[in-house]
Amino acid sequence: MSSLTSSSPTAGGSPPPAADDPTSSLLTWLTASGCTSSVIFPSYLPHRTSLASSPIASDAPILKVPFKCMICPPNCLRSPKDQLGITLKDMWVTGQLRGDTLLAFLISREVILGADSDFEPYIRFLREIEEPETIEVWEDEELEELKDEVIVKRSRLRLREQSGMHKRVLAQLSSHTPSLSLSPLTLDLHLWSWRI
């Protein structure tokens, strides 16, 4: 396995991406963090693609990503310095916030932190996905093609549940830390973070 690379095009291909390209930044960050891979990520192809540069044994890992690169409570809330992080950590430790809802708020926090986030290259890469394609945002015509009313009802219910959960967690955050500014934690950001 080798470090992650964004391979250059062959003759006649497109020029390599700019250094500030989200994909290149992510690959650089992952490599610096100790990630190794059996594949390459060609910059000259129009879509995010990985290719094997040599045969890979069936029992060999394709990608090894260190735990420290994972957006999860232990990594995001190890020693927060911002008020939102401190409050989320307390709510996580006391069991008031957990599961997918906690993860969505952690991702939202990392987006809000911007360049101060330890995960900034990863978040910037994810932010290119303006509207994650999950069933909850499908149009009615698309849902009808499933021919399964139970799935359709559950998908609509999950979206309403997350909207309600966002409102309840904001109330909890406000109650826990009255001075906390909640304006950056919009419903749109929460739903994007939850679906990503």
Image: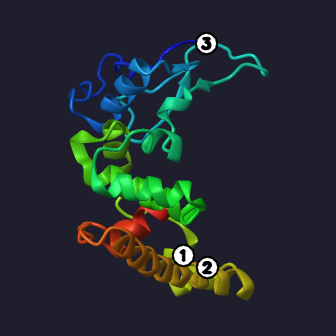
Q: In the image, what residue occupies the spot 48% across and 64% down? A: 194
Q: Is residue 163 left or right of residue 189?
A: right
Kindly identify which residue carries mark 1. 136
Foreground residue among 121 and 179: 179
The part of the image, by quadrant, that contains residue 182 is: bottom left
**Picture disc at residue 54:** 3
Foreground residue among 161 and 41: 161
Q: Nearer the viewer, mark 1 or mark 3?
A: 1
Percent position (x, y) of residue 178? 28, 72
User: Amino acid type of disc 1?
Assistant: Glu
Percent position (x, y) of residue 172? 43, 74
Percent position (x, y) of residue 8? 34, 18
Question: In the rendered image, is residue 69 in sight?
Answer: yes
Note whether 191 is above or below 17 in the view shown: below
User: Amino acid type of disc 3?
Assistant: Ser
**Disc 2 crowd, CA 10 A, few/some/many (<14, 14-19, 20+):** some
User: Amino acid type of disc 2?
Assistant: Ser
Foreground residue among 81 and 125: 81
Note whether 138 is above or below 72 in the view shown: below
Sequence order check, earlier mark of 2 and 3: 3
The answer to whether the residues at label 1 and label 2 have Cβ atoms under 8 Å apart is: yes
Q: In the image, what residue occupies the spot 31% across and 68% down? A: 185
Sequence order check, earlier mark of 1 and 3: 3
Give the distance between the C-alpha atoms of the residues marked 1 and 2, in whole angstroms. 5 Å
Give the distance between the C-alpha atoms of the residues marked 1 and 3, in whole angstroms. 39 Å
Q: In the image, what residue occupies the spot 51% across and 47% down? A: 73
